[in-house]
Image (cartoon, rainbow, N blue to C red):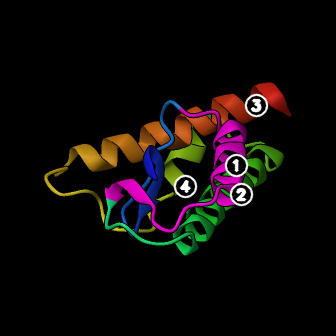
């Protein structure tokens, strides 16, 4: 199955335009499909085991930002204090990778502030 950017394998996922809950639902749906191989949007192909890491990454990102919101941090404080960086940035990202990571935290903050 070709998943596009719904799945990353040992490469940093960016959530700068994401609905994290819809993303988690998509991963759950993919995990129920009868496929042997997954070709992610970034990283090497693998089996369904790569879905677990992607799901854990999203759940951890949600948890981190929810905790920041509970502590009363502003969006700017959350961007400065919270990092989603877990895996290597995709090839050729350079300094733009850090910009996308900050945008990812910002988006998650805005999304969860509206939903919670």
| Residue 84 disc label | none
Numbered range of the magenta stretch: 18-42
**Dots 1 and 2: beta carbons under 8 Å?**
yes
The mark tally for this picture is 4
| Residue 113 disc label | 3
Q: Is residue 16 above or below residue 27?
A: above
At mark 2, the secondary structure is helix
Which residue bears the numbered disc 2? 32
Whole-percent x, y for residue 54 in the image = 56, 61
Counting residues from the start of the chain, the first of labels 4 and 2 encountered is 2
Q: Which residue lies furthest to the top in this view?
A: 114
Counting residues from the start of the chain, the first of labels 3 and 4 encountered is 4
**Dots 1 and 4: beta carbons under 8 Å?**
no
Q: How far apart are marks 3 and 4 (CA)?
A: 17 Å
Name the residue rendered at 56%, 69% in the picture.
Answer: 48
- Tag nearer the camera, 2 or 3: 2
- Tag nearer the camera, 4 or 2: 2
Query: Relative to the observer, which residue lies in front, 31 or 79?
Result: 31
């Amino acid at each position: 199955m070709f998943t596009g950017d719904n799945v990353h394998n040992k490469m940093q996922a960016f959530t700068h335009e994401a609905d994290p809950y819809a993303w988690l639902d998509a991963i759950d749906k993919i995990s129920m499909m009868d496929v042997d191989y997954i070709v992610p949007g970034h990283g090497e192909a693998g089996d369904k085991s790569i879905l677990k890491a992607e799901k854990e990454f999203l759940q951890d990102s949600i948890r981190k930002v929810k905790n920041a919101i509970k502590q009363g941090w502003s969006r700017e404080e959350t961007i400065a204090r919270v990092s989603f960086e877990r895996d290597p940035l995709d090839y050729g990202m350079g300094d733009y990778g850090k910009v996308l990571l900050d945008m990812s935290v910002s988006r998650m903050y805005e999304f969860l502030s509206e939903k919670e």
